[in-house]
């Protein structure tokens, strides 16, 4: 049975662990991120360890037209995609007015635009073939507005919302879409977003391997949205919506300072 996964942001953190987990189950891979050498090393590691086939397509997925190019390159490989994991993304610390506007735009281009375009292309192929699974990496950040990371939180609110809506639309096409909404995870994310000194990062987080396994298994079950930590899930779904908005804003701002 064909079982090829296209994973974006596969060169580190949660994406790398998705690749390891999928390969351990005997699945083939298309690995993408910007760092070609790291992806080539991962390809060699997983092919040798699990006897699977992996392809590497290195590109900046946030660049204009990159998601379309990635899709064209995958088609040129002649492999069908059974699982799409939209994982590539980054955040950015600071007040919106003080931040570099181009950096925030690049965040929107990667976290939202590339995800939407790639999903559109790949999900259409899946629907034509009558099946497929999509896992979009959102975040608990998508459950509330995020002062000190305003654009990042908003991009993840988009991912959380968009993914559930298309999951509903695709129900009769055999294509599932699951959102993985992790809390803080110990990866390269905090450094890249200049968040290492924040209360959130100091409190520590889950491991990338645990979070990837949790999300991947939820995707296999066709779940709509999943949070990797039970207590956090209870807070997000049952407590947060009842709290006064300004209290939520104060609390998120403190956590992101
Ligand atoms: N860590 C957390 O606390 C946390 C919590 C909730 C959600 N998330 C989400 O989880 C996902 C994975 O993040 P992570 O925590 O694993 O962080 P990470 O270790 O920094 O990994 C990010 C991945 O995205 C790739 N990437 C970044 N910019 C890219 C670009 N322009 N084009 C192509 N690939 C790009 C990186 O590869 P290259 O540098 O090689 O391009 C890397 O593979 C993100 O969507 C993030 O928002 C993270």
Image (spheres, rainbow, N blue to C red):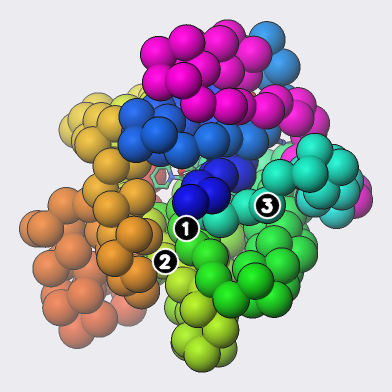
Residue occupied by mark 2: 178
Point out residue 144 in the picture as x, y percentages from the top left corner.
38, 68
N-terminal-most mark, 2 or 3 = 3
Q: In the shown orientation, is residue 83 left or right of residue 142?
A: right
Point out residue 118 in the picture as x, y percentages from the top left corner.
72, 58
Q: Nearer the viewer, residue 106 or 202?
A: 106
Q: Taking the image as drawn, is residue 232 in sight? A: yes
Q: Taking the image as drawn, is residue 161 in sight? A: no
Rendered position, 210 above or below 169: above
Q: Quadrant of the C terminus?
A: top left
Check residue 80 in the rendering and tell me which mark sits there, or answer none: 3
Q: Is residue 33 magenta?
A: no
Q: Residue at x 48, y 51 (%)?
A: 1
Q: Residue at x 50, y 78 (%)?
A: 174
Whether tag 2 and tag 1 are in contact, CB under 8 A, the answer is yes
Q: Mark 1 near ligand 1 (CB under 8 Å)?
A: no
């Amino acid at each position: 049975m064909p079982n090829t996964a296209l994973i974006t942001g596969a060169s580190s953190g949660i994406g790398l662990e998705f690749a390891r987990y999928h390969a351990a189950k005997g699945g083939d891979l298309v690995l993408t991120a910007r760092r070609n050498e790291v992806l080539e090393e991962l390809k060699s590691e997983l092919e040798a360890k699990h006897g699977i086939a992996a392809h590497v397509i290195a590109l900046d997925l946030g660049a204009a037209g990159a998601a379309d190019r990635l899709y064209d390159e995958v088609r040129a490989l002649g492999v069908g995609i059974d699982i799409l994991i939209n994982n590539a993304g980054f955040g950015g610390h600071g007040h919106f007015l003080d931040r570099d506007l181009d950096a925030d735009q690049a965040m929107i281009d990667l976290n939202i635009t590339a995800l939407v375009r790639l999903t559109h292309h790949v999900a259409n192929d899946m629907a034509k073939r009558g099946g497929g699974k999509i896992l979009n990496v959102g975040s608990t950040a998508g459950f509330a507005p995020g002062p000190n990371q305003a654009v990042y939180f908003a991009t993840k609110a988009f991912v959380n919302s968009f993914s559930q809506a298309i999951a509903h639309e695709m129900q009769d096409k055999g294509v599932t879409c699951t959102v993985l909404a992790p809390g803080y995870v110990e990866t390269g994310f905090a450094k890249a977003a200049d968040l290492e000194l924040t209360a959130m990062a100091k409190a520590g987080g889950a491991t990338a391997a645990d979070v990837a396994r949790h999300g991947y298994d939820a995707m296999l079950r066709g779940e709509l949205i999943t949070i990797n930590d039970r207590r956090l899930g209870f807070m997000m779904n049952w407590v947060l919506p009842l709290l006064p908005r300004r209290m939520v804003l104060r609390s998120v701002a403190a956590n992101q300072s």
